[in-house]
Structure formats: C-alpha cells, structure tokens
Image (cartoon, grey):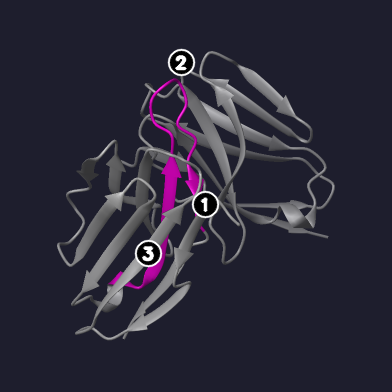
Amino acid sequence: ETGVTQTPRHLVMGMTNKKSLKCEQHLGHNAMYWYKQSAKKPLELMFVYSLEERVENNSVPSRFSPECPNSSHLFLHLHTLQPEDSALYLCASSQRGGSGNTIYFGEGSWLTVV
Amino acid sequence: GEDVEQSLFLSVREGDSSVINCTYTDSSSTYLYWYKQEPGAGLQLLTYIFSNMDMKQDQRLTVLLNKKDKHLSLRIADTQTGDSAIYFCGGSYIPTFGRGTSLIVHP
C-alpha cells in the first residue's frame, strides 16, 4: 500500500457538476497539502492543513473547497469548475516540526473539465 | 518572480552527465530536496541536502548547494534513459516548487 493514496485517478466532469477528490495518507503525518499541476506552469500549492490549521493560497478560486476531517484524510470539493481547471491535482503529506519536512506525494488525480 | 526557478528543458546523450540547476528565494529551509516525476505519476523524493552542507553524494547523484547565491544543483552521472523525467527542487519550510526541468535522455 502506498503512503499517500488518491482517488479517483481520473475524473471527467461538466462545468455544472459537483465532485470531490479524496486523499488518504498512511504515514502518520501531521500535515497534508493540495497541489495543482498544469502544463507549462509552476507546481501550485493550493492548500495546507498543518496541525489542524489551514493555510491557503489566496489566488485559488472559491470553486475549490478543501476539507480535512482528520490528520489522515483530505478532500478537495469541486463545483462549477472551468475548463482551465483541468489539471493534475496532487495530494501530499509531511511531518512538520523538527528540522525536516519531507513531502510525500500521491500519484495524483487527473481532472478534465468539459 | 517565482519562489523557485529552473530551466525548463535539458537534453543529454545516454552515458553523459546531466546537471540540473535551481535557484530559490526562501532561505529558511533546513533541508533542500530534489524530486523526480515520471510521466503520469506523482513526485518522488530523489535526494536531499541539509542546508549547512555544500555537497552530498548519493550513488550517481551529486547535490551541490551554494547558500550564499541560493543555488542548488543536481548532477546525474552516467545518465540513463530511465532518468528521463521532470525534476523539481524545493525547500522544506515552505513546500513550493517551480515548473521543474524536463530531462530528456537520448541514445
């Protein structure tokens, strides 16, 4: 079983749909992240949940809504998305505190908005 | 500008050495990392260097850190076709990454 598991791996949704991406980490980490990876753009940090505190990138539109019910699970709720939101969404986790903060990534969820 | 900057592409011949460079702005990271992303997959940790080190060698990989210039590099010796991937550098304090460098290895 991999350390960080994302489902679904592929998702096609219409602009009026509501869907969610799910992430689960089995590493006992205390921080989880959502990243967006689009072609020809930097890997974008969208949200961080660390020790029950949420940090967000202010440039992320409100049509993306994260939820972190506990330290092992992270969701990204999607509603009324745009075609430009089509991308690979990567979940990651780490153990913050101490001197290191190695990020472990999931395999990603490929999202296509039609 | 971006927090992390890398050149977008590097093309090398199989068996040659590859050097991927990175400049960063955040100087508070205790560790600096290199990640590898193969097609269709997430990022995998490749190697890292502690911020008070200048160099780290890990089999075919050599990481050089110039903290004064905020410059990090990854050298891959004897590059193989299996090394073809996108390589990202990043820090530990604020886990941001740039666009990555696409390494293309041709026979």
Where does label 3 land, which residue? A22
Choose top left, top right, bottom left or bottom right for residue A112: bottom left
Q: Describe residue B21's horizontal placement relative to residue A52 as left or right.
A: right
In the drawing, does residue B78 fall left or right of residue A92? right
* Residue A86 falls within the magenta-colored stretch: yes
Q: Give a yes or no on whether discs 1 and 3 share a subunit.
A: no
Type of amino acid under label 2: Lys
Counting other residues with Cα less than 10 Å from the Cα at mark 1, is it few (<14), some (14-19), or many (20 or more)?
A: some
Residue at 72 percent across and 52 percent down: it is: B83
- Residue A105 can be seen, yes or no: yes
Q: Which residue lies at the image location 54% right of the left edge and 29% below the top edge? A: B72
* Mark 3 crowd level (few <14, some 14–19, many ≥20, 10 Å Cα): some
Labels 1 and 2: the sequence-earlier one: 1
Residue A66 quadrant: bottom left
Direction left: furthest residue: A62
Where does the magenta region start and end?
A85-106
Magenta span includes A79: no
- Decide if residue A85 is on the left or right side of residue B55: left
State which quarter of the image contains the N terminus of chain B.
top left
Q: Nearer the viewer, residue A81 or B97?
A: A81
* Chain containing the residue with disc 1: B
On the image, numbered disc 1 is attached to which residue?
Answer: B8
Residue at 64 percent across and 28 percent down: it is B63
Which chain is indicated by disc 3?
A: A
**Which residue in the protein does label 2 denote?**
B68
Q: CA distance from mark 1 to mark 2?
A: 23 Å
Q: Disc 1 to disc 3, how far (Cα)?
A: 30 Å
What residue is drawn where x is 40% and y is 78%?
A11
